[in-house]
Image: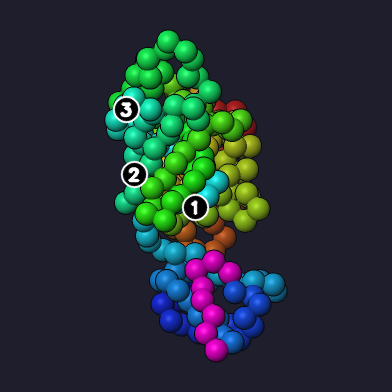
Amino acid sequence: MREIVLPGDLISTNPKAAGSGTYVENGKVYSKTLGILDKNENQVRVIPLKGRYTPSLNDVVVGIVREVTSSGWVVNINSPYQAFLPSQENPEVKPNKKLNDILDIGDAIIAKVQNIDPNMRITLTMKDKMCNPIRFGRIIAINPARVPRVIGKKGSMIKLLKSELSVQIVVGKNGLIWLNGDRRKVSIAEEAIYLIEQEAHTEGLTDRIGEFIRRRKSDAGIET
């Protein structure tokens, strides 16, 4: 079991090692939140166990259109803050084409956080190679605080899911995840992601997820 720390817990005496989820006071590093302590030779950080999504610049998010306006789309990004996608930030916009013919209420998109103003008004863009409207596949939701665990260190967990199942996966920093591919494999990926969310605080998780996927593939008669 990895160590769970509380807000205010002393976790390092080296202020240069302070990473995400920490703060420095009087030359010492303390935990900013309830979470999992993650230490290596160069850095100490705390992975939150729970929390709501707070947008950061350049975050990739999966959002749902909630309103169409004359200048763009209001988008729900699973956050206390609404986001707006201006029409000029959507490459599909063409002259004389109605905006609700491009994206309508209830449509899903993969977008990027382009700007955050002092009042936490979020502006999105789709002018990025990984940004697209979502026309097929499946969207699932997890606690945004578990997103780093689904991705894994240096992308190890997401690479495992993709290589074992040969499915497309886009993990939004806001906890919404798009899956696409063979339905049976997508279902296994969904189960695996929920298992990662549930057991995010445990050690040896990547190996266990690999075993879980291979077992489920065997049960479903899917060739490895």
Q: Quadrant of the C terminus?
A: top right
Residue 191 point in image, percent of width and height = 43, 41
Q: Which mark is residue 121?
A: none
Say if the magenta span includes residue 209: no
- Amino acid type, label 1: Ser
Label located before the other in sequence (2 or 1): 1
Q: Mark 3 sits on what residue?
A: 69
Residue 213: x percent and y percent? 53, 41
In front: label 3 or label 2: 3
Q: CA distance from mark 3 to mark 1?
A: 24 Å
Residue stretch in magenta: 19-26
- Label 2 sits on residue: 82
Q: Is residue 64 left or right of residue 154?
A: left
The residue at 42%/34% (across/down) is 85
Q: Residue 43 versus residue 131: which sits nearer the camera?
A: 131
Comparing marks 3 and 1, which lies closer to the viewer?
3
Q: CA distance from mark 2 to mark 1?
A: 13 Å
Residue 141 position (above or below residue 167): below
Q: Residue at x 29, y 30 (%)?
A: 67
Residue to which mark 1 is pinned: 56
Is tag 3's residue or tag 1's residue first in the polypeptide sequence?
Answer: 1
Name the amino acid, label 2: Gln
